[in-house]
Amino acid sequence: MAVSLIAKPYTLTPAYNEVKFMHDSTNKNLQGFKYIYDIYQSGTTNKIAEYRVLPMYSTGYGEVDLSKLLQSYVSYDLNLTNATVYNATNSHYKYDVKVGEEYLTTTTYTAALTQYLVAPYVGRVQINVANTFAVGDQINITQIGVGVTNPSMEGLFTVVVANPAFIVVNVLWSTIVNPNKDGAITYADGRRTVTRDLHLDLNQYVFNGAIRWVDMPAYDWQDFMLNNVTDRLLTNQPEGTTRLPYFNATLSQDVWLNAVANGSPGGADFMYFFNDSAEIFRKSVNAVDHVSGISVGPNNHGTLIPVVGTLPLIKPTTEYYYVFYFRGGQVSRPYYIGIDRRVRDIEYSILFLDRMGSWSSFAFTGRSYEKGNITRTQYNKNVEGYIATGPRWTYNTQDRGFLNTHITTDTTIDLNTNWMTEQMAEYFVELISSPETYIKVADYSNACDAPISTEYVSCNIVTSSYEVYQKRNKNLIKQSITVKLANNNIVNG
């Protein structure tokens, strides 16, 4: 028996795309055959799933898509106070796939049938084949091969004599038409032969990402392994160039980008920061997990070590800076962040989980409109009143018939961006569709270069339609969005 690999996903693949394994077996034509896929937390005996898969009709291959399973083992990592580096433990998952097989326990006989001559079963049919059956076993016999069939030897039978070299069944020898007809014997209870771990696909990774349908065929996991200057971080944030940063951020915005550590020991890697004055800074990437989250935003880049020049990274005249991953040299593309100083006294920004598992943000420096909605339950009760002199029934005007209960208020905010690049407009779609979003307000009224930022508040995106603007259709691009705070306020009473 042998199970061989036909196809599998890359070693690192997004969990929200297909995670499909295909295998072949030399036993796929046996009765009751199924592939057994055992899925483990990598390097452990913790089995997280088991699948029994029928062979595909056209090829006989076993095929299983693990995306739904593995999606439940990845989420995200977010530490809103982190200004350094962290292990993105929840953003990825390491697993093993062990493939086996099962099929009906079958004994095939090819020797000629003979007549049993020992009492009390004289005249019964003897099947001459090495076997492990016992007296009383219920068996199914299916005739195979070419030649005249024996109708009496097809179906359910009882073993009346058991010997390692032959068995006798309760069929009269006189009914046999063709003693040379071959057959296959299985247990009537469907007993199976199970063999596990015939093929191993170990040390596989998924990360909390989803790649567009049109882009997935071109996906290559090596593009994210940080081995050369063209490799990517785990983000779709626009990269840009020196003359044109495709992504602009205000001084209050936060950004955490995920990177694949690729087995590098802690302390050997760095994130380098270059500003437009040719000054160079760095921070150590000392997280040791397979995926690290690194803070690189204008508001949260944290404490940097000067390599060339003097702190801070962002000076009053700084127009942009860029970051890249460093391991004995540059091993990722540079990601440019332009400094957007077009802010009012009050600025909203929304932090969101992008489709590759990193956290980026957009600022809304245009007009904003905050609206509230009140939800209440009302019911009408009887006004009891009182007996006045006379006697006469009456009531006070303060008595209440309609009562209000379960009163809550919720807040909806309409926001508008400033002018943005075409690449930012495309990336903005990921904000609108993101399942995890948080909003905060920055107050610039004291000093333009020192915003006072409040805490993030969870919110949900209300906007459900969008248009992806392009320069050829619209020279100046703005976007609008409506958000609703994720939690209502309770009213007393």
Image: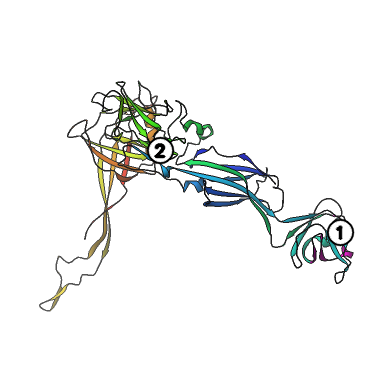
Q: Where residue 479 appears, x then y in whole percent? A: 33, 34
Q: Where residue 343 appears, x then y in whole percent? A: 24, 31
Instruction: Kindly identify the amino acid type of the residue bearing the numbered disc 1.
Output: Leu
Q: Give the residue number, with chain letter if any, for mark 1.
A: 113
Residue projecting furthest to the left:
389
Q: Where residue 71 appears, x then y in whole percent? A: 47, 46
Q: Is residue 358 left or right of residue 310?
A: right
> What kind of element bears circle 1?
loop
Q: Mark 1 or mark 2, which is nearer to you?
A: 2
Identify which residue is drawn at 46% across, 47% down.
73
Q: Where residue 268 appears, x then y in whole percent? A: 41, 32
User: Crowding at label 2, few (<14), some or many (≥20) Cα neighbours within 10 Å?
Assistant: many
Magenta residue check for 241: no
Residue 362 in view, yes or no: yes
Identify which residue is drawn at 43% across, 40% down.
289
Residue projecting furthest to the bottom:
391
Q: Is residue 219 left or right of residue 276?
A: right
Instruction: Kindly identify the amino acid type of the residue bearing the numbered disc 2.
Output: Ser
Marks 1 and 2, how far apart in space? 69 Å
Residue 336 in view, yes or no: no
Front position in the image: 250 or 489: 250
Q: Is residue 96 left or right of residue 61?
A: left
Residue extent of the magenta highlight: 160-181
Quarter of the rendering occupied by the C terminus: bottom left
Q: For residue 105, what is the image quadrant?
A: bottom right
Q: Give the residue number, with chain letter if any, for mark 2.
A: 292
Q: Earlier in the sequence, mark 1 or mark 2?
A: 1
Identify which residue is drawn at 57% across, 50% down.
38
